[in-house]
Amino acid sequence: GENVEQHPSTLSVQEGDSAVIKCTYSDSASNYFPWYKQELGKRPQLIIDIRSNVGEKKDQRIAVTLNKTAKHFSLHITETQPEDSAVYFCAAINTDKLIFGTGTRLQVFP
Amino acid sequence: DSGVTQTPKHLITATGQRVTLRCSPRSGDLSVYWYQQSLDQGLQFLIHYYNGEERAKGNILERFSAQQFPDLHSELNLSSLELGDSALYFCASSVEEGNYGYTFGSGTRLTVV
Protein backbone atom coordinates (compact mmCIF):
# COMPACT_ATOMS: atom_id res chain seq x y z
CA GLY A 1 0.00 0.00 0.00
CA GLU A 2 0.87 3.67 -0.11
CA ASN A 3 3.38 5.10 2.35
CA VAL A 4 3.88 8.83 2.77
CA GLU A 5 6.93 10.22 4.53
CA GLN A 6 7.08 13.84 5.64
CA HIS A 7 9.99 16.03 6.74
CA PRO A 8 10.82 17.83 8.89
CA SER A 9 8.71 16.93 11.90
CA THR A 10 9.19 20.41 13.38
CA LEU A 11 10.12 23.68 11.73
CA SER A 12 10.72 27.04 13.34
CA VAL A 13 11.05 30.19 11.25
CA GLN A 14 11.12 33.91 11.80
CA GLU A 15 8.12 35.90 10.66
CA GLY A 16 8.61 36.91 7.03
CA ASP A 17 10.87 33.98 6.20
CA SER A 18 9.90 31.08 3.94
CA ALA A 19 9.03 27.57 5.09
CA VAL A 20 9.35 24.38 3.06
CA ILE A 21 7.89 20.99 3.95
CA LYS A 22 8.73 17.92 1.90
CA CYS A 23 6.91 14.63 1.35
CA THR A 24 7.66 11.47 -0.54
CA TYR A 25 5.23 8.77 -1.56
CA SER A 26 5.72 5.17 -2.58
CA ASP A 27 2.87 4.29 -4.94
CA SER A 28 3.50 5.61 -8.44
CA ALA A 29 -0.22 5.23 -9.16
CA SER A 30 -1.08 7.99 -6.65
CA ASN A 31 -2.41 10.97 -8.56
CA TYR A 32 -3.79 13.47 -6.07
CA PHE A 33 -1.81 15.25 -3.35
CA PRO A 34 -3.55 17.59 -0.90
CA TRP A 35 -2.08 19.53 1.99
CA TYR A 36 -3.96 20.11 5.22
CA LYS A 37 -3.42 22.59 8.02
CA GLN A 38 -4.48 21.63 11.53
CA GLU A 39 -4.55 24.10 14.38
CA LEU A 40 -4.45 22.81 17.93
CA GLY A 41 -7.60 20.86 18.76
CA LYS A 42 -9.22 21.73 15.45
CA ARG A 43 -10.10 19.78 12.34
CA PRO A 44 -7.66 19.44 9.44
CA GLN A 45 -8.45 21.97 6.71
CA LEU A 46 -7.50 21.66 3.07
CA ILE A 47 -5.21 24.52 2.08
CA ILE A 48 -3.99 23.47 -1.37
CA ASP A 49 -3.87 20.41 -3.57
CA ILE A 50 -2.19 19.27 -6.75
CA ARG A 51 -2.95 16.60 -9.29
CA SER A 52 -0.38 14.45 -11.01
CA ASN A 53 -0.78 16.16 -14.38
CA VAL A 54 0.46 19.45 -12.92
CA GLY A 55 3.97 20.27 -11.73
CA GLU A 56 3.26 23.35 -9.66
CA LYS A 57 0.33 25.24 -8.19
CA LYS A 58 0.25 28.53 -6.34
CA ASP A 59 -2.33 30.26 -4.18
CA GLN A 60 -1.16 33.60 -2.79
CA ARG A 61 1.63 32.81 -0.29
CA ILE A 62 1.29 29.05 -0.63
CA ALA A 63 2.67 26.89 -3.42
CA VAL A 64 3.01 23.17 -3.98
CA THR A 65 5.39 21.43 -6.36
CA LEU A 66 5.26 17.85 -7.56
CA ASN A 67 8.02 15.70 -9.01
CA LYS A 68 6.36 12.53 -10.28
CA THR A 69 9.61 10.93 -11.36
CA ALA A 70 11.13 11.25 -7.92
CA LYS A 71 7.77 10.72 -6.21
CA HIS A 72 8.01 13.73 -4.00
CA PHE A 73 6.04 16.90 -3.46
CA SER A 74 6.63 19.97 -1.38
CA LEU A 75 4.72 22.80 0.29
CA HIS A 76 6.23 26.27 0.17
CA ILE A 77 4.95 29.10 2.37
CA THR A 78 6.42 32.53 1.71
CA GLU A 79 6.32 35.61 3.94
CA THR A 80 5.28 33.52 6.91
CA GLN A 81 3.04 35.04 9.57
CA PRO A 82 2.39 33.97 13.17
CA GLU A 83 -1.06 32.71 12.13
CA ASP A 84 0.66 30.18 9.86
CA SER A 85 1.73 28.34 13.03
CA ALA A 86 0.03 24.93 12.96
CA VAL A 87 0.62 21.31 12.05
CA TYR A 88 0.73 20.65 8.32
CA PHE A 89 -0.05 17.27 6.81
CA CYS A 90 0.65 16.10 3.30
CA ALA A 91 -1.33 13.24 1.83
CA ALA A 92 -1.58 11.05 -1.23
CA ILE A 93 -4.54 9.25 -2.70
CA ASN A 94 -4.16 5.47 -2.67
CA THR A 95 -6.98 3.96 -4.73
CA ASP A 96 -9.80 5.70 -2.93
CA LYS A 97 -8.40 6.77 0.43
CA LEU A 98 -6.04 9.46 1.58
CA ILE A 99 -2.86 8.33 3.29
CA PHE A 100 -1.37 11.08 5.42
CA GLY A 101 2.18 11.95 6.28
CA THR A 102 3.16 12.20 9.93
CA GLY A 103 2.84 15.98 10.05
CA THR A 104 5.12 19.01 10.44
CA ARG A 105 4.69 21.36 13.36
CA LEU A 106 5.46 24.84 12.03
CA GLN A 107 6.17 27.64 14.47
CA VAL A 108 6.48 31.19 13.19
CA PHE A 109 8.10 33.55 15.66
CA PRO A 110 7.29 37.27 15.55
CA ASP B 1 -18.83 25.09 9.90
CA SER B 2 -17.48 22.57 7.38
CA GLY B 3 -20.85 20.92 6.75
CA VAL B 4 -19.65 17.62 8.23
CA THR B 5 -21.27 17.08 11.60
CA GLN B 6 -19.83 14.83 14.26
CA THR B 7 -21.43 14.00 17.58
CA PRO B 8 -20.68 13.96 20.39
CA LYS B 9 -17.79 16.44 20.55
CA HIS B 10 -16.43 14.93 23.75
CA LEU B 11 -16.87 11.52 25.30
CA ILE B 12 -15.45 10.18 28.53
CA THR B 13 -15.95 6.52 29.29
CA ALA B 14 -14.44 3.67 31.26
CA THR B 15 -12.32 0.81 30.03
CA GLY B 16 -14.33 -2.13 28.75
CA GLN B 17 -17.25 0.03 27.67
CA ARG B 18 -18.75 0.51 24.22
CA VAL B 19 -19.40 3.83 22.47
CA THR B 20 -20.87 4.99 19.19
CA LEU B 21 -19.60 8.00 17.29
CA ARG B 22 -21.82 9.59 14.69
CA CYS B 23 -21.05 11.46 11.49
CA SER B 24 -23.31 13.26 9.05
CA PRO B 25 -21.53 14.07 5.77
CA ARG B 26 -21.90 17.28 3.80
CA SER B 27 -25.05 17.45 1.75
CA GLY B 28 -24.47 15.58 -1.50
CA ASP B 29 -21.35 13.75 -0.36
CA LEU B 30 -21.57 9.99 -0.74
CA SER B 31 -18.24 8.99 0.74
CA VAL B 32 -17.46 8.90 4.44
CA TYR B 33 -14.01 8.21 5.87
CA TRP B 34 -13.03 7.65 9.48
CA TYR B 35 -9.62 8.58 10.86
CA GLN B 36 -8.05 8.21 14.31
CA GLN B 37 -5.61 10.78 15.64
CA SER B 38 -3.85 9.94 18.87
CA LEU B 39 -2.09 12.65 20.88
CA ASP B 40 0.52 14.41 18.76
CA GLN B 41 0.17 11.74 16.10
CA GLY B 42 -0.83 11.70 12.49
CA LEU B 43 -4.13 10.73 10.96
CA GLN B 44 -4.58 6.97 10.76
CA PHE B 45 -7.12 5.75 8.23
CA LEU B 46 -9.71 3.41 9.70
CA ILE B 47 -12.45 2.76 7.17
CA HIS B 48 -14.24 4.16 4.12
CA TYR B 49 -17.86 3.86 3.08
CA TYR B 50 -19.38 4.91 -0.21
CA ASN B 51 -23.14 5.15 -0.61
CA GLY B 52 -23.72 2.56 2.08
CA GLU B 53 -21.04 0.09 1.06
CA GLU B 54 -17.73 -0.55 2.74
CA ARG B 55 -14.96 0.32 0.32
CA ALA B 56 -11.69 0.08 2.19
CA LYS B 57 -10.32 -0.80 5.58
CA GLY B 58 -7.17 0.49 7.17
CA ASN B 59 -5.62 -0.45 10.47
CA ILE B 60 -8.97 -0.81 12.17
CA LEU B 61 -9.10 -3.05 15.23
CA GLU B 62 -11.53 -5.95 15.34
CA ARG B 63 -13.13 -4.25 18.37
CA PHE B 64 -14.11 -1.38 16.07
CA SER B 65 -16.83 -1.48 13.46
CA ALA B 66 -18.69 1.01 11.33
CA GLN B 67 -21.60 1.34 8.97
CA GLN B 68 -23.19 3.87 6.68
CA PHE B 69 -26.94 4.14 6.66
CA PRO B 70 -29.36 4.83 3.76
CA ASP B 71 -29.48 8.51 4.71
CA LEU B 72 -25.65 8.47 4.35
CA HIS B 73 -24.83 9.20 7.96
CA SER B 74 -22.22 6.90 9.44
CA GLU B 75 -21.53 5.45 12.85
CA LEU B 76 -18.27 4.17 14.27
CA ASN B 77 -18.68 1.66 17.08
CA LEU B 78 -15.84 1.12 19.51
CA SER B 79 -16.14 -1.74 21.99
CA SER B 80 -14.12 -3.25 24.85
CA LEU B 81 -12.43 0.10 25.13
CA GLU B 82 -8.85 0.35 26.30
CA LEU B 83 -6.85 3.32 27.56
CA GLY B 84 -4.96 3.37 24.26
CA ASP B 85 -8.17 4.04 22.35
CA SER B 86 -8.20 7.56 23.72
CA ALA B 87 -7.88 9.80 20.67
CA LEU B 88 -9.56 12.28 18.38
CA TYR B 89 -11.77 10.50 15.88
CA PHE B 90 -12.40 12.41 12.69
CA CYS B 91 -14.94 11.78 10.02
CA ALA B 92 -14.44 13.22 6.55
CA SER B 93 -16.66 13.24 3.51
CA SER B 94 -16.20 13.76 -0.19
CA VAL B 95 -18.46 13.91 -3.20
CA GLU B 96 -17.11 10.72 -4.70
CA GLU B 97 -14.27 8.31 -4.33
CA GLY B 98 -10.79 9.25 -5.33
CA ASN B 99 -9.49 12.55 -6.49
CA TYR B 100 -11.20 15.07 -4.30
CA GLY B 101 -10.16 16.85 -1.16
CA TYR B 102 -11.91 15.63 1.91
CA THR B 103 -13.86 17.88 4.23
CA PHE B 104 -13.32 16.98 7.85
CA GLY B 105 -15.72 17.25 10.71
CA SER B 106 -14.67 18.79 14.03
CA GLY B 107 -13.97 15.40 15.52
CA THR B 108 -14.99 13.50 18.62
CA ARG B 109 -12.50 13.51 21.46
CA LEU B 110 -12.70 10.16 23.21
CA THR B 111 -11.14 9.75 26.62
CA VAL B 112 -11.03 6.29 28.14
CA VAL B 113 -10.38 6.25 31.88
Image (tube, coloured by chain):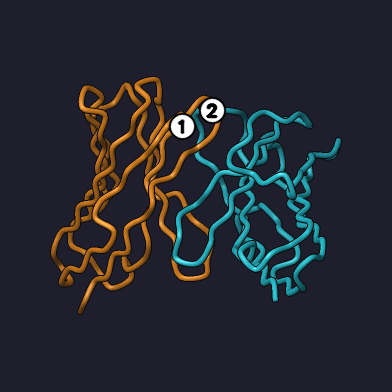
Direction right: furthest residue: B70
Q: Are marks 1 and 2 on the same chain?
A: no
- The residue pinned by badge 2 equals B98
Query: What residue lies at 50% left-to-right and 51% top-to-bottom?
Result: B43
Relative horizontal placement of residue B59, taking residue A45 as reference (left or right): right
Image location (x, y in percent) of residue B22: 77, 54
Of B60 and B54, nearer the camera is: B60
Q: Which mark is residue A55?
A: none
Image location (x, y in percent) of residue B79: 79, 56
Q: Answer above or below: position of A30 versus A97.
A: above
Relative horizontal placement of residue A60, taking residue B84 as reference (left or right): left
Q: Amino acid at mark 1?
A: Ile
Of B67 and B73, nearer the camera is: B67
- The residue pinned by badge 1 equals A93
The colour one sees for chain B in the rendered image is: cyan
Q: How many labels sit on residues?
A: 2
In which quadrant of the rendered view does residue A97 lie? top right
Q: Are marks 1 and 2 in contact (CB under 8 Å)?
A: yes
The colour one sees for chain A in the rendered image is: orange
Of A11 and B30, nearer the camera is: A11
Q: Answer above or below: position of B36 versus B60.
A: below
Query: What residue lies at 69% left-to-right and 71% top-to-bottom?
Result: B112
Image location (x, y in percent) of residue A59: 30, 46
Task: State the SS at label 2.
Answer: loop
Q: Residues within 10 Å of mark 1 (few under 14, many from 20)?
A: many
Q: Answer above or below: position of A67 versus B73.
A: above
Query: What residue lies at 50% left-to-right and 67% top-to-bottom?
Result: B39
In which quadrant of the rendered view does residue B5 lie? bottom right
Q: In which quadrant of the rendered image does the C terminus of chain A lie?
A: bottom left
Task: State the SS at label 1.
Answer: strand
Q: Residues within 10 Å of mark 2 (few under 14, many from 20)?
A: some
Q: Amino acid at mark 2?
A: Gly
